[in-house]
Image (spheres, rainbow, N blue to C red):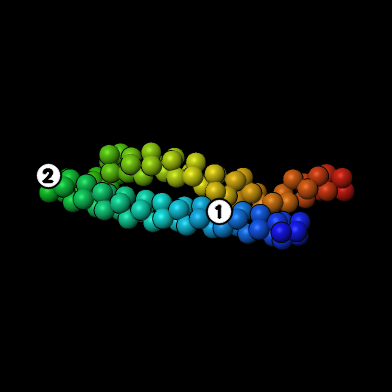
Amino acid sequence: MNEKQRQQQVKYLRAKHKVEELRKYYGHLLVYLLVNLFISCRKVYLKIESGADLLEAILDFDTFAIWIFWGIGLAFHTFKVFGFDFFLGKDWEQRKIQEYIEK
């Protein structure tokens, strides 16, 4: 195998790994949404059954606490998969430098 073929194989393996990471992330996101939606609906239903009104049941911290705590874990997974480029873009730093140079 020559050097160019080896480089192509390395690129392919990196791309394959990235796709696998994305698939796992989107699976995690889907499970997060479905499970938390089910748990929250169930909690609201049970609170209404026990005499609370709808607004009181929805605004109770216990209803959305799992969204927050599991969401922290999902945020870490997001940073792992997408990095900080997810929020600022890959060339954000270079654009900011250029902006300050022009001023």
- First-in-chain label (1 vs 2): 1
Q: Residues within 10 Å of mark 1 (few under 14, many from 20)?
A: few
Residue 24: x %, y % from top left:
45, 53
Quarter of the image with the N terminus in it? bottom right
Image position of 61 with respect to 40: above or below = above
Q: Residues within 10 Å of mark 2 (few under 14, many from 20)?
A: few
Position of 90 compared to 26: left or right? Answer: right
Q: Amino acid at mark 1?
A: His
Residue 103 in sight here? no
Query: In terms of secondary structure, where does tag 2 sit?
Result: loop
In this rendering, the count of numbered labels is 2
- Name the residue that disc number 2 marks: 50
Q: What residue lies at 38% left-to-right and 42% top-to-bottom?
A: 70
Residue 9: x %, y % from top left:
66, 58
Q: What residue lies at 77% left-to-right and 50% top-to-bottom?
A: 95
- Name the residue that disc number 1 marks: 17
